[in-house]
Image (cartoon, rainbow, N blue to C red):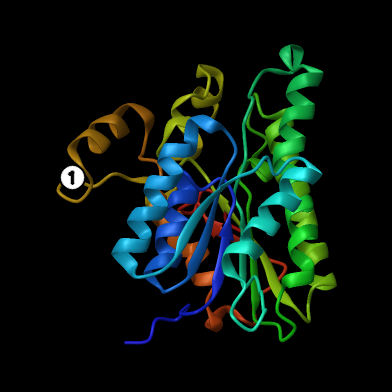
Amino acid sequence: MTRPLEGKLGIVTGSSRGIGAAIAENLASKGCQLVLNYTSSSSTDAANALAGRLSSAHGIRAVAVQADVGTPEGAASLIESARQHFTDAAGRFQIDILVNNAGIARNNLLPRVTVEDFEATYRVNVLGPLLVTQAAEPHLPRDRSGRIVNISSVSSQAGFVTQSVYGGTKAALEAMTRTWARELAERATVNAVNPGPVEGPMYAANPPEFLNDIHGWVLRTPLMRAREGVDPDDVVRDARASGGRPAYTREVAGIVGMLCGEEAGWCTGQVVCANGGMIMQ
């Protein structure tokens, strides 16, 4: 059976774990060849293991590439590594899918936000996607078949406490999404998705002020209601205290994968819900 992304090449930044790894899994299951990007040497083993597992499980080729995408050199190195690995016998190299997923969060109340927090977060969350998309642009398709998906957050709109900096970076990413959708219209669609709480260490590391502030939002998010007999017991148990469960990474990945398909070709410049209804537009 032909898979919908057979023969295409995708690059997913920040994909050694979490949402990025789940996105890579989703794309690989549809036949997409993959470049898995990671930044820290501590992620090398995880990234290589994921590349090996996806290659074996889905019959695709996946390679892990270490690069700090928040620097011009790192972004250029990522695309050059992709070119070296995936140029075909006729000398053709094309990037069909780009998912700008890499991101960090340094949450703090306004009096405790530092310039270093600001610069580090904007470098990774805003400058990084800009630099990677710039470096990828010469290699995008020229028939509108390309797909760029930027991973934003409900924090761009909700005004959560402690997220002066993080929320601002995601609002900036959404603004760039709309601009790129116009500038790259003959090359690729460009959309963003906006997860709310998602399982994993980033959510677990949030300070008490943040968790207290979002409690009401969680209670009122339709799909965050945990279900006994469907969700794992520990998720149901934790939801009794938190008000609801976070998204599973595969649920966010499914929405990204949907936007990467041919059927999504008439959708561009949008921020697509990936938050269970926490934000309704």
Q: Which residue is mark 1?
A: 228
Percent position (x, y) of residue 7?
Answer: 50, 79
Percent position (x, y) of residue 237?
Answer: 23, 31
Residue type at numbered disc 1? Glu
| Position above or below: 266 against 64 | below
Of residues 240 and 183, the one drawn nearer to the viewer in this rendering: 183
Tell me what residue is drawn at x 41 percent, y 73 percent: 30
| Position above or below: 178 against 70 | below
Quarter of the rendering occupied by the N terminus: bottom left
Left or right placement of residue 256 versus residue 240 in this view? right
Tell me what residue is drawn at x 50 percent, y 38 percent: 217
Left or right placement of residue 28 versus residue 102 in this view? left
Of residues 87 and 64, the one drawn nearer to the viewer in this rendering: 87
Quarter of the rendering occupied by the C terminus: bottom right
Tell me what residue is drawn at x 48 percent, y 38 percent: 44
Percent position (x, y) of residue 262?
Answer: 55, 82
| Quarter-of-image position of residue 133 | bottom right
Q: Helix or strand or loop: what does disc 1 sit on? A: loop
Tell me what residue is drawn at x 55 percent, y 26 percent: 213
